[in-house]
Amino acid sequence: MDLQGKTALITGAASGIGAACARSYAAAGAHVVCTDVADDAGQQVADEIGGRYRHLDVADSSAWTALASELADDPGHLHVVHLNAGVMMGLGNIAEMSDEDYLRIIGINQHGAVFGLRAAVPLLEAAGGGHALVTGSMASFSPLPVDLGYSMSKHAIAALVRSAAPNLAERGISLNAICPATVGTGFLGGNRDRLEDAGMVIMDSEEVAEAAMAILDSGLTGECFALFKGREPEPFPFATVPGSDYRSRR
Ligand SMILES: NC(=O)c1ccc[n+]([C@@H]2O[C@H](COP(=O)([O-])OP(=O)(O)OC[C@H]3O[C@@H](n4cnc5c(N)ncnc54)[C@H](O)[C@@H]3O)[C@@H](O)[C@H]2O)c1
């Protein structure tokens, strides 16, 4: 995809998947607005790719409003928004989950995507259309008993994408999710070697960045693309709800 003269905004750009995607959007010609809460690392990525860094806690709706108003005055057109920032909670016992644990993970992983999409849509529309991509996970499709909050928040990404896409399509905006299996980032907490020794297949962030570009260029919307190492991203085949044709039968 040619992003010459276009602006791309990405959250969680300081490391891992976000940093790799920021590099690949810049390589396609975009001016990249890198955002994160890890300011030093985020600034470094932005400097490396000739982009701009802004501190943005994705869970803070007023911070989104401020950034959107800055971008509205921007001469470049916002063409791509990639809502990528996310955290894990690492808790499987609901009885041990504090309010703080729960609100933090839902705030960052779920509210962060909702606030970001809401802030970006008017800008994408003003630019004549564009693309929104959210980083989901295999946990968007499957239960994850070792991390309840993570699975709940990533299921919400699938619901957001599949529900919001039809309305956005009428306004020239595509909305998809990229849902990778395990990726070798800070998420693994330095356990990559141990996990690989145990037989787990781990992909690199660059492979996710390549897939993200392919999804933006796919012409599809409302899809949650599953991504495994060495394979093309594939839209997840959600099942039809049994009996969901009841209206047409009555
Ligand atoms: N690594 C994996 O195995 C894997 C697999 C599937 C999906 N994902 C998803 O990929 C996305 C990126 O994760 P990653 O693997 O690159 O890990 P990472 O830890 O390298 O990157 C996450 C980034 O999000 C930032 N962040 C954390 N809280 C934030 C907040 N409140 N506001 C803004 N930024 C914040 C962090 O500073 C960090 O730079 C996440 O949404 C994660 O759920 C990761």
Image (spheres, rainbow, N blue to C red):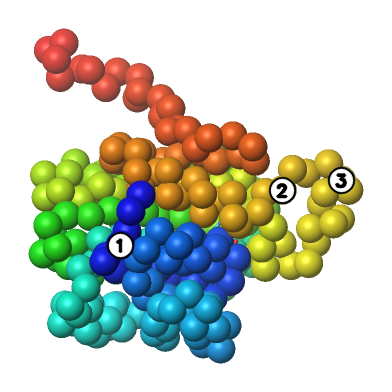
Which mark lies nearer to you, 3 or 1?
1
Q: Earlier in the sequence, mark 1 or mark 2?
A: 1
Which mark lies nearer to you, 3 or 2?
2
| Disc 2 residue lies near ligand 1 with CB under 8 A | yes
Please give the residue where the numbered disc 2 appears in the rendered image: 202
> What's the CA distance linking mark 3 and mark 2?
11 Å
Residue 32 lies in what quarter of the image?
Answer: bottom left
Where residue 4 is drawn, which disc sits there? 1
Residue 73 lies in what quarter of the image?
Answer: bottom left
Q: Quadrant of ligand 1?
A: bottom right
> What's the CA distance linking mark 1 and mark 2?
32 Å
Local packing at callout 1 (Cα closer than 10 Å; few below 14, some 14-19, many 20+) is few
Which x, y percent locates residue 165? 24, 45
In the image, residue 111 above or below residue 71: above
Q: Is label 3 in contact with label 2 (beta carbons under 8 Å)?
A: no
Is residue 81 among the parts visible in the rendering? no
Please give the residue where the numbered disc 3 appears in the rendered image: 198
Q: Earlier in the sequence, mark 3 or mark 1?
A: 1
In terms of secondary structure, where does tag 1 sit? loop
Local packing at callout 2 (Cα closer than 10 Å; few below 14, some 14-19, many 20+) is some
Nearest the camera: 240 or 47?
A: 47
Looking at the picture, which amino acid does disc 2 mark?
Ile
Which x, y percent locates residue 212? 45, 50
